[in-house]
Amino acid sequence: MATGLVLRDIHQPAAPGWWPPAPGWWLLATVVLVLAAAWLWWRRRVRRRRLRLQALFDATVATAPTPAAQVGAISELLRRAARDRDPRTATLADAEWIGFLRHDDAGAALAPASLDLLRDGGYRREVAAGAVEQLRGEARALFLAWSLRR
């Protein structure tokens, strides 16, 4: 009874190719790209804000004609940043203000010599330029920490 028909094994279809990906992969890629773009936009915004604040601080202090006036400008900038951060600081007087600066949690602390200079440096006739530069560096870090935190 041989009819001449030869039976062959069942052939499996070819494996699917890797391209184009399934819709879930397209969705995942879109979500990842959107998140990456949002993160880059946010980092750029923070960086530009930091640069604007640094330029504001430096320009304000640089326009002061004397070292004593520079100390006054630094004090004004710190008070403005502190007031934006916590409105209760607007009413702080000398010792309370220095205490606030000493015990703040911003992570950028002022040295005791800088605190003394900040307290009464604006009223001195002569202020050492080196002390003002030290205060300027410390106060700039504190100003940026307060301004960028809100």
Image (spheres, grey):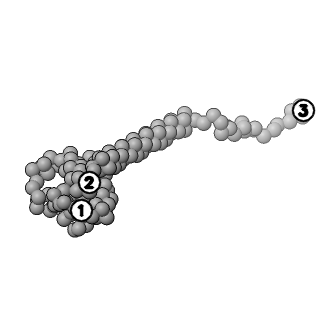
Amino acid at the residue labelled 2: Thr
- N-terminal of the pair, mark 3 or mark 1, is 3
Give the numbered dot on residue 4.
Answer: 3
- N-terminal of the pair, mark 3 or mark 2, is 3
Q: Nearer the viewer, residue 66 or 47?
A: 66
In the image, taking residue 59 as reference, residue 75 lies left or right, namely left
Residue 72 seen in the current view: yes
Quarter holding the N terminus is top right
Identify the residue at horizontal 14%, vertical 51% (top origin): 89
Circle nearer the viewer, 3 or 1: 1
Circle nearer the viewer, 3 or 2: 2
Percent from the top left, x then y, of residue 10?
Answer: 75, 38
Q: Nearer the viewer, residue 63 or 141?
A: 63
Is the C-beta separation of discs 1 and 2 under 8 Å?
Answer: yes
The span from disc 3 to disc 2 (Cα, nearest Å) is 112 Å
Percent from the top left, x then y, of residue 122?
Answer: 18, 56
The span from disc 1 to disc 2 (Cα, nearest Å) is 9 Å
User: How many residues crowd around disc 3 within 10 Å: few (fewer than 14), some, or many (20 or more)?
Assistant: few
Quarter assignment of residue 140 = bottom left
Percent from the top left, x then y, of residue 44?
Answer: 43, 42
Q: Which residue is mark 2?
A: 66
Q: Which residue is mark 1?
A: 127
Callout 3 secondary element: loop
In the image, taking residue 120 as reference, residue 144 lies left or right, namely right
Callout 2 secondary element: loop
Q: Nearer the viewer, residue 82 or 9?
A: 82
- N-terminal of the pair, mark 1 or mark 2, is 2
Percent from the top left, x then y, of residue 138?
Answer: 30, 60
Identify the residue at horizontal 36%, vertical 46% (top origin): 55
In the image, farthest residue toward the front:
125
Quarter assignment of residue 7 = top right
Callout 1 secondary element: loop
